[in-house]
Amino acid sequence: MKVLITGARGFIGRNLTAALENTKEHDVLRFDKDTAPELLDEYCSKAEFVFHLAGVNRTGTQSDFMEINLGLSARLTETLKKHNNTCPVMLASSIQASLGNPYGRSKKAAEDLMISYGRETGAEVLIYRFPNVFGKWCKPNYNSVIATFCHNLVRDMPFSVEDPDLIMKLVYIDDLVEELIRAMNGRKNGTGFFCEVPIVHFVKLGDAAELLTSFRDSRNTLGIPDMSQDFIKKMYATYTSYLPQDQFGYQLKMNTDARGSFTEFIREGAMGQISVNCIKPGIVKGNHWHHTKCEKFLAVSGKGIVRFREVGSAHVIEYQVGGEVLEVMDIPAGYTHNIENTGQSDLVVVMWANEAFDPERPDTYFLEV
């Protein structure tokens, strides 16, 4: 299918273009403000579906809203009519179309134009009044408070929350793109001319700012957001997309001694703790047991032996571990255990515990295996 996307380099257009190109089933005809104007004529002659996303929502001159938002729509429909092309046309409108501000009036005028075009030509017209949209590649300090918060947080720049109790209606970019592709395939969510993205999130402005701030702080706390919450997962993905390219990495606090090192990687309450244990050749670590704390060891490099002895028993159990065969070792409660590096290089072990270490309640008791 030949798909024309106006505003292809904008926030929604870029995400939609990427999603369509991932399928390898569409010929995407990109039209943007930097595209040669005469190409619109060529694209309108062969498009089988049109996503009309181009427009402005911020401008220095209020008259630009009508000239651009309505003007682009008029140019598009006239060019389609010139080629007798009655393919479906999707229009990106805004919830502000119901308001009386200059931007809203321009979007309402574009809607009316599209409805008239559909009635005149018989072409299917799909109008989406988008609320606030968030996600990767959204321009900060433009029309998305989420984008602005993320951009400022990762750069330690200040931002203000003027009304923490303001409830925002948010749509995630991937949900939006999925709906547009469904609509293109004849499965729109709506009746008549108007459609909508089915997945919407309502959140207080202050809560959104607090959540994003917790993502920034997680590099120090080693916490992981609750990814079982759909909105949190989407916000975290959005936040990470704004990280400066020279700040993807961050160092952890390594606890080192002659035996090697022990480094906490993740500490997350109900999900426990993940650490990396580096053990020098010939070194034995451990020789302790737990009442309730359970662990998993995964040796990813080197060679070693994990030994167990049930408290009160004399029987010792041994398991060979190493990076050549990745085998997870469960460390049951009630067994004293240790791990010895029997190789010539560092033994590197990824360790998970079902609870983060609490020095006030360590549940760790020394006992030789």
Image: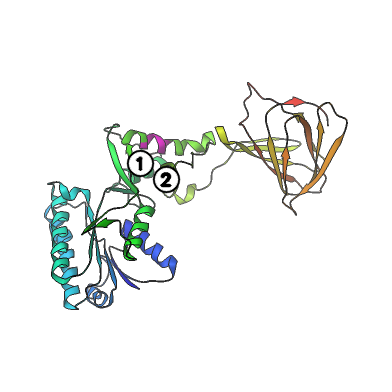
2 or 1: tag closer to the N-terminus = 1
Does residue 363 sit above or below 152 in this rendering?
Answer: above
Query: Depth check: 320 or 191 in front?
Result: 191
User: What element does badge 1 sit on?
Assistant: helix
Instruction: Give yes or no for residue 62 being in the magenta stretch.
Output: no
**Residue 239, labelled with which disc?**
2
Tell me the colour scheme of the image: rainbow
Kindly identify the amino acid type of the residue bearing the numbered disc 2.
Tyr
Calculate the distance from the C-alpha at mark 2 to the C-alpha at mark 1: 9 Å
Q: Is residue 268 visible?
A: no
Q: Which segment did they paint magenta?
A: 208-213
Q: Residue at x 19, y 48 (%)?
A: 96
Mark 1 = which residue? 149
Query: Depth check: 62 or 226 in front?
Result: 226
Residue 318, image quadrant: top right
From the viewer's perspective, tell me whether residue 80 is left or right of residue 2.
left
From the viewer's perspective, tell me whether residue 349 is left or right of residue 15.
right
Q: Residue at x 30, y 56 (%)?
A: 189
Query: Farthest residue in the top direction?
Result: 360
